Amino acid sequence: MKVMITGSDGFLEQKLAKSLTDNPVIAGKEVKELTLADVSR
């Protein structure tokens, strides 16, 4: 599964990304690609 986290500079998004790198499984499916995106102004 591919996962994209938008707004990845936020506190919750960073915790989610860390969690997915430590345990890359969602609903029993392996996360094979993780993309982080954020918009800076």
Image: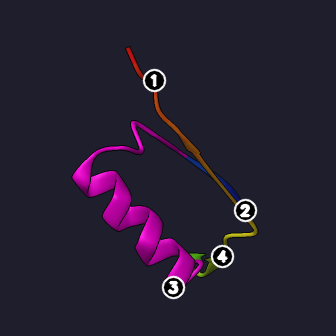
**Which-is-in-front pick, marks 2 and 1?**
1
**The N terminus appears in which quarter of the rendering?**
bottom right
Q: Where the C terminus falls, by quadrant?
A: top left
Q: CA distance from mark 4 to mark 2?
A: 7 Å
Q: Which mark is residue 29?
A: 4
Q: Do the numbered discs 3 and 2 sit on residues whose CB atoms are within 8 Å?
A: no
Residues at marks 4 and 3, CA–CA distance in whole angstroms: 14 Å
> What's the CA distance linking mark 2 and mark 1?
24 Å
Front position among marks 3 and 2 = 3
Which amino acid, mark 2? Met
Dot 3 amino acid type: Asp
Secondary structure at numbered mark 3 = helix
User: What type is the residue that disc 1 sits on?
Assistant: Val
CA neighbours of label 3 inside 10 A, class few (<14), some (14 to 19), many (20+): few
In this view, the residue in front, 2 or 36, is 36
Q: Is disc 2 surrounded by few (<14), some (14 to 19) or many (20+) residues within 10 Å?
A: few
Which label's residue is closer to the chain start, 3 or 1?
3
Q: N-terminal of the two: label 3 or label 2?
A: 2
Q: Which mark is residue 22?
A: 3
Local crowd at mark 1 within 10 Å, few (<14), some, or many (≥20)?
A: few
Magenta range: 5-24
Q: Which residue is mark 1?
A: 39
Q: Nearer the viewer, mark 3 or mark 1?
A: 1
CA gap between label 3 and label 2 equals: 16 Å
Q: Position of residue 13 (x, y in %)?
A: 35, 53
Amino acid on which disc 4 is placed: Lys
Residue under label 2, please give it. 1
**Inter-mark Cα distance, 3 to 1:** 25 Å
Tell me the mark number nearer the camera, choosing from 1 and 4.
1
Label 4: element kind: strand
Q: Quadrant of residue 15?
A: bottom left
